[in-house]
Amino acid sequence: MRVARALIRMGVLWAALFGLFAWQGLWKTLLETLVGRTPPPIFERATLLELALEHISLAGLSMLGVLIVGLPLAVWVTRPSGKPFLSLVSSLTALGQTFPPVAVLFLALPIFGFGSTSVYLALFLYGLLPTVSSTLVGLAGVNENARDAARGMGMNERQMLLRLELPLALPAVLAGLRTSFVLLIATAALAPLVGAGGLGQPIIAGLSVNNLGYVLEGAIAVALLALLTDYTVRDLERAITPWS
Amino acid sequence: MSAAIQFQGVEKRYGPTLALENITLEVPKGELVVLIGPSGCGKSTLLRLVNRMIEPTGGALLVEGKNVLEQDAVSLRRSIGYVIQSIGLFPHMTIFENVEVVPSLLGWEKGKKRRGAAELLAVVGLEPDKFGDRYPKQLSGGQQQRVGIARALAADPQILLMDEPFGAVDPITRERLQAEFLRIQSEIHKTILFVTHDIDEAVKLADRICLMRDGKVEQYATPEELLGNPASDFVRDFVGADRELKRLGRVSVASLMGPMQRSEFGRETSEKAAIPGTMSARDALSRLLEAGGELPVVDPQGQIIGTITLNDLTVARMDERSMDQRHKAT
């Protein structure tokens, strides 16, 4: 019930945001009042809605990769079988984030060539840390007494994980996931540097032809996407953890 | 009476240190046995051996006649109730869901689980309609403790393990919980192994007390025996200088009083002065100290049934009364 209400609320907000992106006329008026009519301040090679959808798919698919790899990885290194790898995984994911995404983009170029693949790789590596480390923190923070009680009542390892540890780690997991996702949406603006699309296109084009309007158009749209993503995950977090 | 739990020369070694040394002990079916001793004496370790949270390194431990090491740990644990000091309620589950944990693990059908949970919440004094859908955070410490007990009873285990279950609540709540717990136990007659470091709690609740030190049993006896006949200086010190008072706390006035005095016949007793027969001898002593030499004892209807004097409360008199017709004080 609570979750359904949150989903409806978010659906409405996202529809509104896409409606805003699709309203090309509004953006034209806005940018013209901000930076003047010449040069024409609105990016013309693609509509804002197309750019935004491209952007979301770049960040979204990388995020999916982060979840598919990051969550099981974090769970595994907290199990007895994976414990020896715990510190290795923590350092590697930290390394993934200390490496600047621009550098990863250009390092990936010779291997994957121009296009989205290099972007996915760079974003994936960059987004891994917050999700993995928060999940590790969340799992480590599960109350020792609750764990003892669960074991003493006869839960096996799998039941402990599914019925106790993961639900209790959920707030931390979601917080990490939120950080990763917002980070990826912001960083995906670099994608056009290696020939991929998204909201970075007007920004980069604007920088090279010195058109402030283009830059603003892309930057405002990225910011709106990031904000709504952050809000969505927060809202979902509240809806699915009513006990906290 | 047959033994529900038997420790046969049980030993637990951590590296070079012996945490438990040659423990031989029988816990009779339906009795409440308290394990007590200074911290580090091994009482909790002994408790946790029973549901294989810890495994012995020597000797044998039989539960209902079967060696625990020959049983599947998970199903053994599901068949034994478990309550720990910090309760360990699951914060993300409602009170109902918490109580239903073991029935869920056992795959009970939903309606049966919920009916059982509601019934047990009522037994421990929590209205199911009011509390069932709340989260543990929304309950007081004492209420959480009650839920912990209800949860341990949910799958109707024959054995309960309780590790300082009333340790984390304030003294007043603790006394109330103890009294209610005694009432529940008098109805359900489970075999209970109960760890505490509080000798008053032990004397109040126990059918038998096992006093431990340095991984060994110092004395295993009824509270009366332990208090009246300490096996060693350590036991004597541990139970305290007021051990005779503690002993008085376990018997009712009615079991020690003398016959009615002739002068009492037809005499009006002011309700204030009279002592109910169910009062503990310890409380009666306090009243006698206040009132002087002797006081009338009355039954619940207010009829005088005897007299109690300071002399009735002396150790010699207590030993005179046979212990097998022990009346437990309330």
Image (spheres, rainbow, N blue to C red):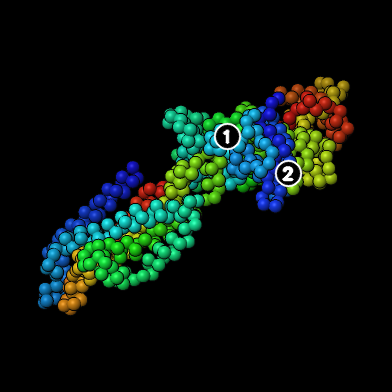
In percent of width and height, residue B58 lies at 68, 41
In-image side of A8 versus A133 (left or right): left
Q: Nearer the viewer, residue B43 or B66?
A: B66
As shown in the figure, which amino acid type bears the numbered disc 2?
A: Glu
Whether residue B201 appears in this view of the structure is no
Q: Quadrant of residue B219?
A: top right
The residue located at (57%, 44%) in the rendering is B87
- Residue that mark 1 sits on: B71
Q: How many marks?
A: 2
In percent of width and height, residue A197 lies at 19, 65
**What numbered label is drawn on residue B21?**
2
Q: Secondary structure at mark 2?
A: strand
Q: Which chain letter goes with mark 2?
A: B
Q: Residue furthest front?
A: A111
As shown in the figure, which amino acid type bears the numbered disc 1?
A: Gln
**Quadrant assignment for the N terminus of chain B:** top right
**Quadrant assignment for the C terminus of chain B:** top right
In the rendered view, would you say A48 is above or below B249?
below
The residue located at (29%, 70%) in the rendering is A107
The residue located at (67%, 28%) in the rendering is B29
Instruction: Give the Cα distance between marks 2 and 1.
Output: 23 Å
In-image side of B58 versus A226 (left or right): right
- The local crowd at label 1, few if under 14, some if 14 to 19, many if 20 or more residues have their Cα within 10 Å, is few
Q: Quadrant of residue A196?
A: bottom left
Q: Nearer the viewer, residue B294 or A31?
A: A31
In the rendered view, would you say B197 is above or below A101?
above
